[in-house]
Image (cartoon, rainbow, N blue to C red):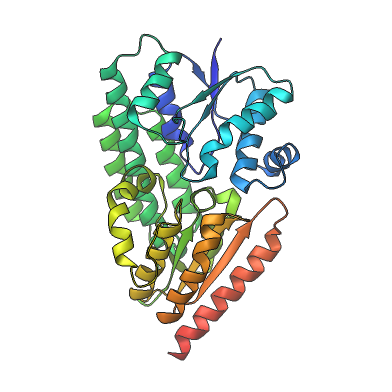
Amino acid sequence: MKIISFPHMGDYEIPIKFMLTNLTSCKVKVAPPITKKTLILGTKYSPDFVCIPFKYNLGNYIEALDNGANILVQAGGGCRFGYYGEAQMQILKGLGYKFEFCSIANDNGKMGPKTIYKAFKKLNPSLSIFKYIYYVLLTMLMIILMDRIDIKIRKNIGFTVNFKDYLKLKNEMLNRFSQTKGLINLIFNFYKYKRLFKKIPLNKPKDCLKVGIIGELYTCMEPFASYNIEIELAKMGVEIERYTDLTYLLITKHLNRKYLLKRVKSYLKYHLGADALDNIARTKSLGKRKYHGIIHTKPFACMPEVSAIPIMDKIAKDYQTPIIYFSFDSQTSEEGIKTRLEAFYDMIAMKRSHK
């Protein structure tokens, strides 16, 4: 039996599993949830110089293979991560695992409709182009609706009377989304849970602290990789805005790309690769909107983000907006992250009170 699996990233295993279930003839088995064991496994068998997303993904693959998977899916990326699939495949085969590697990216590490269709066609020879288009569009819609709910959650979760109400309702919604029967069913569930989220009582002041989270995509979207920074901020009573989600990666980024340099032309003349330009533009946007603070997350030694830091520093200084940088690797201390986060919160709270 063909059993297919893939790495974790936030809650997106829900739409990814939905798509694979409907477009391939394989049994879909989601990798075990990310834990410290995942990172330990990934770190043990990874080269020292690779970034933390590589290590998490490799750990996911090892746990998925140990869990019975024999087909692994690898996506593309806008930086060197787009070329990591070959390295991960060689490492896993060197460890003695027997499996098939399914890459949905082309030779340049980029994904496109034709490339993805060809990859799925190999796994399901009877897949028609019409069925492919329908389920890809339905999956895209599911991602967009999930991200829209998440935006509301980040703005309000820190001000709930009972903090766990949002998380409980979100898990219930994701379970419903995973059982989607079609377009009407998906839209019905979206509006149902949108109403339910509005009914959750809030105690939100008009002048609450607002923090924007920017940075490299994996450390922004995978809570375990950033030690749940968003939840820790919410517990402090902070409204959070995060730009990077799967809707941004698949749709918004491509639409905004040619306008980004114009927005920051006084600070930057060229693209820096991956999401560096986007984060420079976001720093300026958050500064203009008078956000109380900015948090930038990245893997240790992520070159595009390292290159962007001096420019973001300059913009933050020009707009008098505090900014803090978090780099993550397998040696990162959770207590150190929490201590720095608490100190940053105290600083922006004090700065606002002085004003």
Left or right of 264 on screen, residue 169: right
Left or right of 203 on screen, residue 325: right
Which residue is at a point 62% across and 56% down the rendered structure image? 301
User: Where is residue 340, by image quadrant?
Assistant: bottom right
User: Closest to the observer: 120 or 154?
Assistant: 120
User: Closest to the observer: 212 or 105?
Assistant: 105
Across and down, in percent, residue 161 comes to 45, 63
Across and down, in percent, residue 108 comes to 45, 35
On screen, residue 131 above or below 239:
above
Across and down, in percent, residue 234 comes to 50, 63
On screen, residue 103 above or below 45:
above
Across and down, in percent, residue 255 comes to 27, 49
Residue 305 visible within the image: yes
Q: Quadrant of the C terminus?
A: bottom left
User: Closest to the observer: 53 or 172?
Assistant: 53
Left or right of 195 on screen, residue 222: right
On screen, residue 320 above or below 241:
below
User: Closest to the observer: 268 or 120?
Assistant: 268
Instruction: Determine the residue located farthest toward the front in the rendered image.
Output: 269
